[in-house]
Image (cartoon, rainbow, N blue to C red):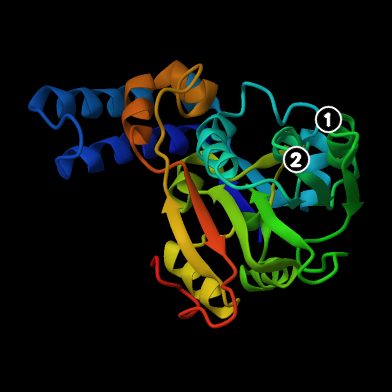
Amino acid sequence: MPFHVHPLAWLLALEGVALLRAQAGDIGGEENFVARRIAEIRRLCADPELARRTGAVVGHASTVEGYAQWAGSYDSEENPLIAVEEPQVRRILAALPPGRALDAACGTGRHAAFLAGLGHEVVGVDSSAEMLALARAKTPDGTFHEADLHDLPIEPTSFDLVVCGLALTHQPALGPALREFAKVVRPGGHIVLSDIHVLSLYLGGVAKVTGPDGGLRAMPAGRFLAGDYIAAIREAGLEIVACHEPRWGEAPGGHGGPLAQQWCPEAAELAYRDTPAVIIWHLRRPLAGASGPLGPNM
């Protein structure tokens, strides 16, 4: 259902997160820090410009609608999530032997192009025609299909590697997609997943686009915890090789967006600093006779 957002509420929320972290001893909790936060909260609440600003009701957009708008700018330097996610994913991929690779929810084809450069035969799947057009241009030797993650047009056990980057949060449940990945990868094959971390969703990470009426619309964003992934991984019969949670570091232009940088940059920086930005899973489909769904490395 629609929900309400307000500029002042966003700024006060960042101040509150910074204070919560200070009270837990996580960041600068000295008396002057707390006094600065309280003084800034008072200033924000009393500012006439902020008092004049109104909130907005946010509706909902499908991923097809959202990524049609995002396609042209998704890979830009203004996407800080990619800057955190990509290095760790590429380290995992670079350590795997070349083979036949599926880039599921390939988007603009950033992972597909990297896989092709490593020597993989690449197939990409996405539900956005606009994103697929960019992926095909990046990897002209690849094969790309328009399809959903829960219904892949792929033969069983036909891939050595499946990659799915920053897409599972848009699914209503993790199980259907993970079962599809387990089906299309060969025994002994690898699956590499990345997604926005649930904590980042609460720090402004729910993606929003503009609707036909000019209003804000939020794309689907499931609040999946690590335990939810583990349960779905077990159900799909996969084993966990590794799990990584890269943290937010410095962000170009600062954290929290232009509004936060204008009104409370210190609180925004301290709300984000060293919190997990993404969660990355390296999985493997066990060979026949392996020790179990979580495997010997868990």
What residue occupies the far bottom of the structure in this picture?
Answer: 289
Left or right: where does residue 209 sit relative to residue 131? left
Say which amino acid is labelled 1: Lys
Between residue 266 and residue 141, name the one nearer to us.
141
Residue 105 at x, y = what percent? 75, 51
Residue 9: x and y in percent read 45, 38
**Residue at (76, 69) in percent of width and height:** 157
**Secondary structure at numbered mark 1:** helix
Residue farthest along the left direction in this orientation: 31
Q: Does residue 35 appear in this view? A: yes
Residue at left offset 56%, top offset 64%: 284
| Label drawn at residue 99 | none
Residue in the picture at 73% in, 50% down: 99
Circle 2: element type: helix
Residue in front for this viewpoint, 47 or 238: 238
Question: Can residue 48 be seen in this snapshot?
Answer: no
For marks 1 and 2, the one nearer the N-term is 2
Residue 138 is marked as: 1
**Residue at point 74% right, 38% down?**
119
Dividing the picture into quadrants, the one containing residue 114 is top right
Q: Nearer the viewer, residue 288 or 44?
A: 288
* Mark 2 residue type: Ala
How many residues crowd mark 2 within 10 Å: few (<14), some (14–19), many (20+)? Answer: many
Q: Is residue 161 above or below residue 253?
A: below
Q: Label 2: which residue? A: 112
Tell me whether the residue at label 1 lies in contact with that at label 2, contact meaning CB atoms closer than 8 angstroms. Answer: yes
What is the x, y in percent for residue 125? 82, 52
Q: Is residue 93 above or below residue 31?
A: below
